[in-house]
Amino acid sequence: MGSSFGKNISLSIFGESHGPSIGLVLEGLPAGFRPDWRLVDAFLQRRAPGRGELATPRREADSIEILSGVKEGVLCGTPFAAIIRNTNVRREDYQRLNDIPRPGHSDYTSWVKYGPAAERSGGGHASGRLTAPLCLAGALCLQILAEQGIAVGSHIERIGQAEDRRFSPLQVNPADFAALLSRPLPVLDEAAGDEMAWQIAAAAAAGDSLGGVVECAVTGLPAGLGDPIFDGMENRISQLIFAIPAVKGVEFGNGFAAAGLTGSANNDDFIIAAGQIRTAANRHGGILGGITSGMPLIFRAAFKPTPSIAKEQGSVSLSRREQVRLQVEGRHDPCIVPRALPCVEAAAAIAVYDAWLEQKKYL
Amino acid sequence: MGSSFGKNISLSIFGESHGPSIGLVLEGLPAGFRPDWRLVDAFLQRRAPGRGELATPRREADSIEILSGVKEGVLCGTPFAAIIRNTNVRREDYQRLNDIPRPGHSDYTSWVKYGPAAERSGGGHASGRLTAPLCLAGALCLQILAEQGIAVGSHIERIGQAEDRRFSPLQVNPADFAALLSRPLPVLDEAAGDEMAWQIAAAAAAGDSLGGVVECAVTGLPAGLGDPIFDGMENRISQLIFAIPAVKGVEFGNGFAAAGLTGSANNDDFIIAAGQIRTAANRHGGILGGITSGMPLIFRAAFKPTPSIAKEQGSVSLSRREQVRLQVEGRHDPCIVPRALPCVEAAAAIAVYDAWLEQKKYL
Amino acid sequence: MGSSFGKNISLSIFGESHGPSIGLVLEGLPAGFRPDWRLVDAFLQRRAPGRGELATPRREADSIEILSGVKEGVLCGTPFAAIIRNTNVRREDYQRLNDIPRPGHSDYTSWVKYGPAAERSGGGHASGRLTAPLCLAGALCLQILAEQGIAVGSHIERIGQAEDRRFSPLQVNPADFAALLSRPLPVLDEAAGDEMAWQIAAAAAAGDSLGGVVECAVTGLPAGLGDPIFDGMENRISQLIFAIPAVKGVEFGNGFAAAGLTGSANNDDFIIAAGQIRTAANRHGGILGGITSGMPLIFRAAFKPTPSIAKEQGSVSLSRREQVRLQVEGRHDPCIVPRALPCVEAAAAIAVYDAWLEQKKYL
Amino acid sequence: MGSSFGKNISLSIFGESHGPSIGLVLEGLPAGFRPDWRLVDAFLQRRAPGRGELATPRREADSIEILSGVKEGVLCGTPFAAIIRNTNVRREDYQRLNDIPRPGHSDYTSWVKYGPAAERSGGGHASGRLTAPLCLAGALCLQILAEQGIAVGSHIERIGQAEDRRFSPLQVNPADFAALLSRPLPVLDEAAGDEMAWQIAAAAAAGDSLGGVVECAVTGLPAGLGDPIFDGMENRISQLIFAIPAVKGVEFGNGFAAAGLTGSANNDDFIIAAGQIRTAANRHGGILGGITSGMPLIFRAAFKPTPSIAKEQGSVSLSRREQVRLQVEGRHDPCIVPRALPCVEAAAAIAVYDAWLEQKKYL
């Protein structure tokens, strides 16, 4: 039982990648708010499969069907529920996988956990497809936060061996976020994007896949959000970010690099700038003691390479308990990272929205 | 409101570093279990301040006073509550900090969040001292897990520029864990430990501090623990690990390095070994889809350098709203990492115990 | 935000009575369990509107559409999600109510809480119609409990001035439950049922309505379920029973009558019967200290009369802030009680299932 | 695991009646609030044992020791933790009870649930003594609510066969609450109080005990508090009220009496009074659809007679599995009801405070 999140919101995600539909229930949205549903849809399309030549040929319309909580486009304050139909399921692709778990996937662990009931899976509930409802929840939170002047954006920092430069942590700007979306790959340095595209194409040609790193920033945050000990901003964001199946690491501000620095090199002096208390640098990533400092919140998430590859791999037959060779056939992204950006932004937005509601209780 | 954790347990941590006491309430422990209280105490002593020449001279007995849930040494099944008295508070060290927040600390963010009420702080509730109750909770979970053959251990992978080798992820062994504890610094490669000690001493002499990385392993785990989407093992562990104040990053298995690999280089083939389904390598760190695979669970946590340093730094006067120079005087560890190991192990143990209880509901 | 329940299960209910659909997400069901879906449907039909001449003429098919968590009829262990379409909404009936709240209804309080967004309501989210997903959740829990020998049944103890006799608390028997369902009204004493039917018909003829009391019993419970202080069986059941909109009181065992007795008249001696520890009487209703005693669990829920009546009543125009006369037109039950029985049983079953899962963690 | 409550607050209660101490952790209180600690103490004294000739001779100072969350009398915003020492434990009184459960008590059910670990009990964790921390939590919530103009009061409506009149639900007034506290027993009609005192004395003389009913009112509530479906005001209050061990029933407004009325007799017309929307009567007890209507919130809780009586009763020896006669010796109230009033008020205050915080998130 792990498909619910939130203390100030209640988000339940349901569905299996190859069942009839996936969806969510999200409670804690404000009555009377009118989302821009075209923006919601545009946000979901960034994640949807089958966009562009670098992605999986499995194309899903990913249009949402609202079940409750909305009247004439306006939020009612009651639970928002919506589904996305799985329209393009080719179950035969996954049939064989029931007995032969794919390396790097949750096929085997789901089988242990759920038994024969996990057969439907093809990744099942622990599937990347379930990030669609996460994005839908995030899209709504993003719009509510936008009214508070809070913006969330992300870029690809790395794919394989190709690296983009990082956000400038003192000067990251919401205007940059829009620019990122206009590029073939959302990168700050377009040359890096070309290199990434080349590497993805090469991996695809080799029947292989690539991982990467996404860097995400939240701007316009007031100081004071986040609730130590267990619901600080890092705790909240990381609990959500690991809901994206391929994520294997997360770091805030200087992150792992801070481990190699001295205190004097890593601490950020406080200064007065334009009458405001700020920090001279932003190695702390906008979070001190789990609480926002008012500086841009910066974090990075590491994605492993897509485990489904065309190359032959070693696996076992669960029924015969013997080693076999496996060639995964389905339709898979050679690199999930470009489609993962809205998921990362959604995780950040949901975490921030939950913390923001908490703070409102004491105003 | 963020001081509670758990779905199958309920852990509440309370206290401020410079108040009268810190403590916890932990519900969800089995009635009739008799902890080895000397082991509990020994575990807490690994975290306690003032041990060894590399640590803070602030010495606290850190002996626990049990308030409820135990009779004649045996757990009653009712909530376990205990406190640790703060016996060695020198509040004057922290007086000045009320107006001048220390760079890298939560002084400023706590002041924004709690207002003048945060004055007691000196780090306050978001303080490293609050990891003592976390360790106490972890010590109890560890002993319950030990009865299931589950063991948790950790070593220092890095301090400053000095690096230990890593756990061999296929062969990490509980016997190693005990050996680690017998060394001056818990490292696999003793030469690395000498180098670390030297670097810490040099930083201390310079009035500076160092960060580091802790690598933690959990062995003996059955496959099938962990609950996607939001309570997978990575989600649970990371929500707990970021309860340790200085942590700025966490990664599982190959972690960030996986972002630079191809799928064929990062996937772990399934094999049959001694009649069991295993993986040929363990780059996945024992977790697939948020669920344990039966392989050792491996993760690393990055600690920033202790923010309290003797070197002069820039800060601001909150009352006068002007920039000032600050020299932090109190008593502080030049490197928190050696004392952080039991905290990391505690976080892992609590996460695993919570997941294990969840799984028992369906057996 | 109040539409989620459960510590060991996670139940989210969504929808509005006059929106497109109502539904639920229920996590915590066992993988591999095959519900008898005809029994699920039969259980829902007991609650569905439009059954029999005593009920509302609004007829809904109330057939469920499963969205996730089931494959080939078997539970997957992943969240179970399902909806029921609102097929027979006559919104015009409710249009006028937007400005003139019905006495005894949540129209006014919803309007204060949610503002104009509550307009959709006609009772909205706080509507009796939302007990359909509650019943669906209960129907599944009932079947899982049945495998443990636990049964839940109920009868109408009172409607208006007509009273049935009570369950004999020592001898209540699952076989009785089936018999109750075969009668026009589920009563123990058929003459009482005839009187109730007559009273309902008389109230309907007068454009009025009636309330009543439902008595519910749970048999086959092991001793030891229930978790003081806040999750004892009474706490759990009452939190769920008040999710049924018209309930205004709940009592366990002797309930309010115990307030007029002496301890010697209300205490139940322990005895040994057939080698088992039992109580000589069952005035405690099967719960002592919040924990089941192994005796039948007995409670009663009081239902107010349906607030929607044809008789003219006084109300106010919200827009004009003046008093007006109101005649409610829609289609309404003269007495909701007969349809409330499965809701009460569902509440009991969900509470017991949640407590039973909790107990399994320590076996 | 049931000792935690709250969605917007987190309240954990710990301790056993005959262990070293009992206490609580309460998170969600506002930083900077300065409680009147004498009022807190006075509130606790209303519940404390050994006050007056009608009560148990077991006298406990019940003075609180604050562990965290307060500095110089002011709330810090961090978790408030406090304990009350059990200073007057005569364990020998309870020794014999370990093998012979007292009728009407949780001795037997605790023994089944917790096994030999429950021996400490004498009622243990499911003991009336644990209402002291509940009252402490309530005392703090009451003071915060008082700043909003919200007041909570209660009187004894019945003890044994002696009945007080009820609050006038339209005119209940905070000023009445203070008057109640000045009387020997808190009743509206002093003659009823005399009769109650006589009945209690008579029961005590007979080695017997009496139950009763407490009526509680909350005034000054804004309309709009409470969160259907599972966190409406009735759900919240009842989940808390059943945390008081002897409660066996709860009803709101007309409660069980509504079951015998017609809709036209039970509905409350809306009116305009002094420019405000009000109801003409208040049979709904201030709650419609789980949400406050702005009218006084009224409910009643039924208490069973104290199960510990001097009269000989039948029980069993758990070890020998045979029937025995039991005479309970300890020190017990012949009627717990007078001391229960602050517990009922505390439950109401905590429920309202939790709902009020929820509402603030959307202002």
Image: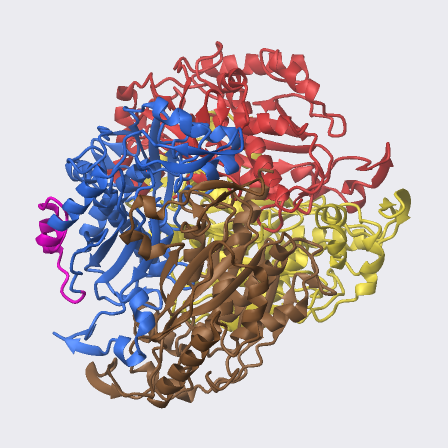
Chain colours: A red, B yellow, C blue, D brown
Left or right of residue B148: residue D11: right
Q: Is residue C190 magenta?
A: yes
**For residue D55, above or below residue D188:** below
Say which residue appears at 29% left-offset and 47% top-offset.
Answer: D262
Say which residue appears at 61% left-offset and 58% top-offset.
Answer: D79
> Dividing the picture into quarters, in which one does residue A277 lie?
top right
Please provide percent x and percent y for residue C161: 22, 54
Please provide percent x and percent y for residue A76: 48, 30
Please provide percent x and percent y for residue B262: 50, 24
Magenta stretch bounds: C169-193
Q: Is residue B288 visible?
A: no
Q: How many marks?
A: 0
Left or right of residue B354: residue B41: right
Left or right of residue D267: residue A161: right
Please provide percent x and percent y for residue D140: 60, 61
Considering every residue shown, the one lying at the far top of the view is A53
Give the position of the C terminus of chain D as an image quadrant: top right
Left or right of residue A264: residue C24: left
Q: Is residue D207 magenta?
A: no
**For residue B282, above or below residue B187:** above
Q: Nearer the viewer, residue D140 or A134?
A: D140
Q: Nearer the viewer, residue D38 or B282?
A: D38
Q: Nearer the viewer, residue C145 or C84?
A: C84
**For residue A182, above or below residue D339:** above
**For residue A353, above or below residue C235:** above
Q: Is residue B346 visible?
A: yes
Q: Nearer the viewer, residue D41 or D52?
A: D52
Give the position of the N terminus of chain D as an image quadrant: bottom left
